[in-house]
Amino acid sequence: MEASRNAALRTLAYACAAGALLLCASGSPATAATSIGQLDPGTPAGSCLGGSSWVQSTEAGPPSYIVPAGQWVIVSWSHRANSASGRELGVRVWRATATPGSYTLVGAGAWRTLTPGGINTLYERIAVSGGDILGLRVGNPPGGGASCSFTAGVGDLIRYAIAASEQPPGSTSSLSLLQPANRLNVTARLEADADSDGFGDETQDACPGTAGSASGCVPAAPAPGKDTTRPTAKLDARRDSIRDGRIAVWVTASEAATVTAKGSLRVASQSSTHRLRTATAKVVARKRERMLLRLSKKTRRAARRALRRGKRLVVKVSVTLRDAAGNTGTAKRSVRLKR
């Protein structure tokens, strides 16, 4: 009996009933925001058991607690609170299974501490589908909680269960306890979700018609991370002659960079150090580039005299690399001289 009544309610869903505040078009689902459920028309005084889960199982008439056909998002829900302070309540959405009294939890809002003695309106984002049923979860175990229900018509029936812990969405529970001639003290505002991205098209979706996870939009591509990698280089050099007045060094850089090469020569018989002329070049990644460091006439004469006397001369070459991000790296190499 109950299963057939639920099937009839889901088919009708009271979609065009004046009390449900729905906008309908013949043969097509509603697209404007709408509401389901009903608040206690009086002044709530009682309290439901803490740690309990509730669903509006059957209804004697409108307004309905059943989500109309289509894809929707609960963007807010309301509850008329009793005068007790510190009461906890959370909105829940259920889907009936083929087994009477068995329901699958399809959506769970956050726990809320109610402001006593008035209507609390609380914002959520819960994706729901046609046929889903509005429900509640009462906190404050093991004592009493919020006024979750009120007396209504003979054909109204609430199902509930008491459990200290709640199963996560996707779990199926048996709500076997009955509260006849009662309705849940809750309403929910629904907005259509045409692109099925879980954002209400009117107030939550910044890009209606395009599914996305960033307020209903496709997330922007992340900005490239800052380059903090230092360039490196491999230096190759052979024993070089001073006849042409140049010392050759081959540079292979790890990335495109500006390369500055410097050289120094110390002759044993002299106290001063001779500096070679600095060379600069732009190199590409992993391509062997030749760089030439020139010796001044004075340095060449000093080196030639020392080599004639059989001295061993070495030019110390240091290379600095700077990439486009400003990172720098260095490399060093020694080049032995010959006449």
Image (tube, helix red, strand yellow):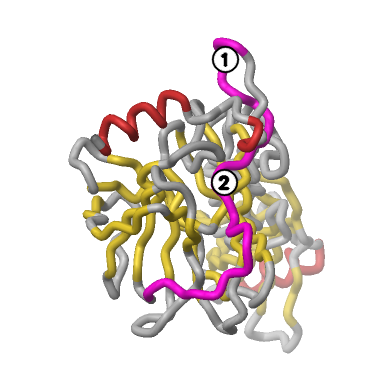
Asked if residue 29 lies in the magenta stretch, the reply is yes
Q: Position of residue 125 (x, y in %)?
A: 57, 50
Give left or right: position of 70 versus 52: right
Q: Residue at x 44, y 39 (%)?
A: 60
Asked if residue 189 lies in the magenta stretch, the reply is no
Q: Residue at x 48, y 52 (%)?
A: 152
Give the residue number, with chain letter if any, for mark 1.
Answer: 28
Q: Residue furthest front?
A: 154
Q: Residue furthest left?
A: 99
Q: Quadrant of residue 10?
A: top left
Picture quarter with the N terminus: top left
Q: Position of residue 45 (x, y in %)?
A: 55, 75
How many C-alpha atoms fall within 10 Å of the one at disc 2: few (<14), some, or many (≥20)? Answer: many
Q: For residue 74, which numbered disc appears in the image?
A: 2
Marked residue nearer the N-terminal end (1 or 2)? 1
Q: Nearer the viewer, residue 329 or 155?
A: 155
